[in-house]
Image (tube, coloured by chain):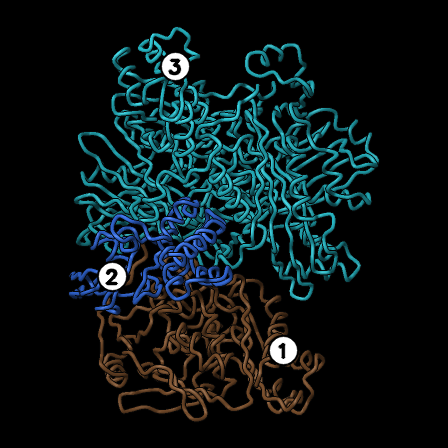
Chain colours: A blue, B cyan, C brown
Amino acid sequence: MPTWLDREVEKAVVRLLLNGEEVEFLAPVHKTLLEVLREDLGLTGTKHGCELGECGTCTVLIDGRPQLSCLVLPLQVEGRPVTTIEGMAAGASDHPLQAAFAELGAAQCGYCTPGMLLVAKSLLEANPRPSRAEIQEALAGNLCRCTGYAKILEAVELAASRMVAT
Amino acid sequence: MTVPDRTGSVGRSYPRLDGSAKVRGQAVYADDIALPRMLHCKILRAQAPHARILSIDASAARRLPGVVAIITGRDLPIRFGILPVSQDEAALEEHKVRYVGDPVAAVAAVDEETAAAACEAIEVEYELLTPVMTIEEALKEATDEPIQESFSRRRDNIHRLVSYEFGDLEAGFAAADHVREDVFFFQGNTHLPMEQHSAIASHVDGRLTLWSSTQVVHYVHRALSRVLELPMNRIRVIGAVHGGGFGGKTDPFAHEIVVGKLAMLTGRPVKCTLTREEVFYAHRGRHPTLLWYRTGVTRDGRITAMHLRTALDGGAYGSYGAASVFYTGTLQTVTYDIPAYKFEGVRVYTNKAPCGPKRGHGTPQGRFGIELHLEKIAHELGLDPVEVKRRNFVKPFSRTVNWLRVTSCGLEECTAKVLEASGYAQRERRTGHGMGFAISAYMSGAGTAIYWNDMPHSEVQVKVDRTGATVYCGAMDIGQGSDMVLAQIAAEELGIEPRDVRLVTADTDLTPVDLGSYSSRVTFMAGNAALEAARKMRALLVEAVADRMGVADLEEIDVGGGRIGEFSFEEACVIATTRFGALSTTGSYKPPRIGGPFKGSGVGPSPAYSYSAAVVDVEADPRTGIVTVGKVWIAHDIGRSINPLLVVGQVEGGVYMGLGEALMEEQEYRKGLHKWPSMLEYKSPTFLDTPPIETFLVETIDPEGPYGAKEAGQGPLLPVIPAVNAAVFDALGVWVDETPITPEKVLRALDAKAKGKPPRHGPRSFPAVPYGEPIRVDPPARDDLRVGAELEAAFGQTPGAH
Amino acid sequence: MLRLPRLRYLRPASAQEAATVAEDLGTRAMLVAGGTDLFPNLKRRQFDPEILIQVPSLPGIVKEAGGFSLGATVTLAQAAADPGLQVFLPGFAEAAGLVSSPPLRNAGTLGGNLCVDTRCNYYNQSHEWRKSIGFCLKKDGEICLVAPGSPRCWAVSSSDTAPVALVLGATVELTGPEGSRMIPASALYRDDGMEYLAKEPYEVLSAIQLPAEPGVRTAYVKLRRRGSIDFPIAGAAVALKLDGDIVVSCRIALSAVASHPLEVPGAGEFLAGKRLDQEAITAAAELAAKPAKPLDNTDLTHFWRKKMVRVVVEQALAAAAARSA
């Protein structure tokens, strides 16, 4: 019998600045941000591929920087801005990265897409004109099995050029 | 048949239909589904590679608060399997386990944590049996008992033996100026879809609904019906948005059956999502395969005879394996003209996760071997390998020695494209730099159904009413974009935009049967069915419009640009509904009989083959053995590119996956266990490990493909792997005759070369296999393109098998 | 989904308070900073604490006379991108920037990387996998599965920053309930896969002081299968001081070839006073590689990794020499 099962579940009220909105929830403290987003807050746009920090699929932005939501406790990021894929578009209009990914076929099965998009968003905010090498480096922690990354690279470049132009 | 240039949607790039949902996080994958009162299921898996189950004690687990139900093999005794000849799996094993990861018991609990704890609390008592972990061990008599003890009278662990001789092998070898033998090993690897398998079941009103991450709703439907003993009309299987398959979600799986059973037992919805480690156990990936080639050639490199032996490590269950073993040998002939061909294959059971179909299904192994084998022959003869391969290319519209029918074939064009673009002939020649060339072919759908029947492989309905057009098809879009292809075909015929076509796919209640997304069949087969249904609908619309316009000649009614005749499409729908009542048309596709007059001829035939050629540029460091791919040029004969954006996406993805297999992906076992069932240690190339890929699409307009289209999902993976090895030889003068090319293997080959031994690293011998007497088959007339009844009528006149 | 075990989570206000709580709770608790090493291990039940104690946010990167002071909760991404470190101690910034993957480096901390659990592919596996193979010495088992005859655990030190800290002569600050103490980074490690840290379990590694001696050139070369994500399978850190092309002093340390970051003083000393030409580099690399003992418990074969130690040392020496002083 697993020893941890006898332990009481400690719960905590956590406040997050999630996709620009203040949210407050009560959750067991040992649930990761990934689990809370998907299971308690209904934000299933954040996907998971390993839950061990090895694939990048569950990436969200914390303080605007990519982090693996499978390796973060909500209490560790309390009060800080968290952006998930659901918070990337401005209302009905897609973020230029989202538009470019859809347009160029950078999402095939689409499962790695939310993580890829958020990392790319963070990259373009810090570096509006990234080189190909910088794009590859920034996205190197996010595995994709469908695209061979080619269309993803093109989509980030396309979005960057459009964002710089406007 | 000439196909006019299309002015509609066919041939144009459209992004996938659900592109927006996917980039906005709105696409609902199976694990995203949560139903009220849903229970969570975890599966207890075997912790021994080969053992008898003496007892299962779940009493402590049942007492845990939050545990709602626990089932074992006793609750699901009916065995199943994807092929009728291999009904060797159980959803939960009752008496015996065959690999670490084999499902033994399942728990439904209020949350996943409780379910996992309950699994840990289940006591299973095992009597250990000797594990069989290699092909060589499996060929010997079993120490205690065979792995599939009741499925064979054999005492060894041989699952399948095949042996064929097409044409006069002896005469072929006698005509050769030169004969060469080579042995290769293709390591096992896995699909590694980013999405872990997930299924959720709900049992309401005596009907079971299952949402699953599957490539084939129909096969899951069949397996559920069989094992749960429910008529198919009580079961609905819905393909949830799919997070990647590559062949890995083409079998029915234990967890799909288990959640169905638990939903029926508990009256509550039940979900099971595999962990990444469990995905490695569910597997069905590439078979580790040994290959032995013996080929006779003339002085100028023309093949006179070829003898191929393969041995596949199948893992613990049959899966698609009875077909996989054929695929290692059958498709060699659709690229190279082989006048006499002997093929012997064996698949063995081992105590590992079952192998099955991964992108290319059985053919990457054979392709790897034949491409490298021909390279070596050419070098030995002092000929240019590219030239030798070219001399042996099959002719378009011909029949192979093993009765496969080749129709459109763009091998020459593909070859010319990649040679030119890569500057292969003028490549920089220095130690450490090299280029490699290889070609391949793949099926546009298997010519024979998985389970024997004479029904169509694809059925499509098109419905038109006052609200517009809807296409219904059982095919599953697994990310390749097949939904858009179907929409484009319907739109093309109806003269509207693809986005104006509603598409309902992969739902067994709503859509007619399609055999699903595997074997590169959807565009070709479902596409042809959609084409037929849409053309019938178009005819009805045109007839009604012509009638309304008072035009007698239907040819005068133009269809296109959202208009039919002088009416908008919407108006035409109203006119046609008014004229005919409810409007629904159907289309279906069944490939013609293509295979020859011999048992086993059903594996290999396809209504059309795609062709690819690739050049790979590498840097190979002689000091470290590290191989870095600089660029890949690939040309793919797609027949016709219905949607170039999607086709190029498939080609690039295939190249990527091929590079992973060539350079780093491998499934290794140690002490009876998968050595590294994780995303960290199973090496999938990252962005930084993936070179630029330049893709060329070659259009040969196949006479039987929809608008001339052929497949793109699998073929482009195939040439990449041998091209990498050939490039390494070009760079360093050594052969790595196995996959993946790890740096150490390169160094070992260099070391052998330095010591004056054959400059290679790889297997040295091929085991003795009791293949038995071959089925001898006389070759067809090589220009005989007859199919179906005409072909069958001809069987009487042809000697055939004897 | 793999999940954490049930835990309580404490957030002390200071490192000292964290150490005090950790001492009180003993083996029931573990310290956590970024969590990128600990959480996967907890999900695989390699540890079974009831309580996690958060290491509170500590001061950032401060340029001081003679070097840098870095709070242990500085993230690997911050260290990699720090302009001061990039200029004065590029080898250290490089090492931090080569740890795992970009998103992981935004959470993973310097302290965490210096204390990263030793790794072994018999150990970094799920509870079910380890149960199937019969558990290993490092967790729940009786024998080391890599070297069954050996009385010790051979898990591998897999820190990228630790060897650089060693060659720089870094000092680490350990905060206990009574206050803090400074020890050389080299004294932080033990050559033991299980007890690999020579500190009290409750002590918080709270800061690291990196001397930045004028004229010292640093480099770190990491070998791994892929361009990202992977732990090192061999690595070499070099701190080199040159007078023209004559070596004044040189320190070399290796990662991923032993249970501790392995300094190879003989190789560095050999170079002192010599012209740093290819011949000297080759000879030094040869010496450096000798004590490396890779075993069959990480990626790729240990025969090959052993060969590659020489290569990464040569590359690191060449990279350091090519740097401006």
Q: Quadrant of residue A165?
A: bottom left
Residue lying farthest to the top in this orientation: B552
Q: Position of residue B149 (x, y in %)?
A: 47, 38
Which amino acid type is marked by label 1? Ala
Q: Nearer the viewer, mark 3 or mark 1?
A: 3
* Mark 3 chain: B
Look at the image and tell me in which quarter the N terminus of chain B lies: top right
Q: Which residue is mark 2?
A: A31
The answer to whether B436 is drawn above or below residue B551 in the figure is: below
- Badge 1, how many Cα within 10 Å: few under 14, some, many 20+? some
State the SS at label 2: loop
Front-most of residues B544 and B645: B544
The answer to whether B164 is drawn above or below residue A17 in the figure is: above
Q: Is residue C25 left or right of residue B561?
A: left
Q: Residue at x 31, y 46 (%)?
A: B105
Q: Is residue B372 left or right of residue B200?
A: right
State the SS at label 3: helix
Q: Nearer the viewer, mark 2 or mark 3?
A: 3
Q: Distance between the Cα atoms at labels 3 and 1?
A: 75 Å
* Mark 2 chain: A
